[in-house]
Image (cartoon, rainbow, N blue to C red):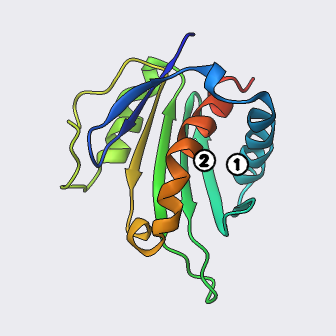
Amino acid sequence: MTHIRHVTLTTGHARDSFQGEVAPEALGALADLLSQALAGGRAPIPNTGCALTATAEGHALLATVYGAEASGVAPPIVTIGVARKSRVSPRLWGLLHEDRLQLATDPDTWPPAPWCAARLDVGAATYPEAMGWVGDFERCLAWAWVVRQ
């Protein structure tokens, strides 16, 4: 595989991400973070004050980045879907579009796999500082999932 198509559902922006854009050390760290999140609960994302949750089914990954709240109730900042294989695309793309009226992408047209799609959630307004790093985090997490054995 040469690239992952990275789509921001909220704006419709899309670009190809190449594995060489992600340092091997970052892939290793994100593989560990992803394993923690898939094991259940919220995995702290180092140096951000945020946390990651994740579920996987076959070749599909659905992950959410949450902000940190003193009360323990944190709003979702971004929801990320990653499809390794095209057979999981319709269901995963549909989940990301479910009940969302303000997305710029077509709920019936997804990119060829592998792809990563990100939907900004309510916490994006509450945590504007996350917008400086979350886009890179999305594509790096996608590569960690795609190369995972």
Is the residue marked by circle 2 packed among few (<14), some (14-19), or many (20+) residues within 10 Å? some
- The amino acid type, in three-letter code, at marker 2 is Thr
Vertical order, 136 against 84 (above or below):
below
Quarter holding the C terminus is: top right
Look at the numbered disc 1 and give the secondary structure of its residue: helix
Q: Position of residue 14 (x, y in %)?
A: 34, 31
- The amino acid type, in three-letter code, at marker 1 is Leu
Residue found 38% across the figure and 17% down from its top = 112
Q: Position of residue 91 (x, y in %)?
A: 38, 35
Quarter holding the N terminus is: top right
Residue found 67% across the figure and 64% down from its top = 48
- Residue that carries the numbered disc 1 in the rendered image: 38
- Label at residue 124: none
Query: Given the current orientation, which residue lies at the most extreme bottom position?
Result: 71
Residue found 62% across the figure and 36% down from its top = 140
Residue sitting nearer the eye, 72 or 20: 20
Q: Position of residue 51 (x, y in %)?
A: 65, 63
State the CA–CA distance, disc 1 to disc 2. 6 Å
Is the residue marked by circle 1 packed among few (<14), some (14-19), or many (20+) residues within 10 Å? some
Look at the numbered disc 2 and give the secondary structure of its residue: strand
- Residue that carries the numbered disc 2 in the rendered image: 55
Q: Quadrant of residue 123?
A: bottom left
Which numbered disc flags the more N-terminal residue, 1 or 2?
Answer: 1
Query: Given the current orientation, which residue lies at the most extreme top position?
Result: 1
Vertical order, 143 against 35 (above or below):
above
Vertical order, 87 against 6 (above or below):
above
Vertical order, 39 against 51 (above or below):
above
34 vs 84, left or right, is: right
Residue found 60% across the figure and 47% down from its top = 55
Q: Quadrant of residue 6?
A: top left
Mark 1 in CB contact with mark 2 (< 8 angstroms)? yes
106 vs 77, left or right, is: left
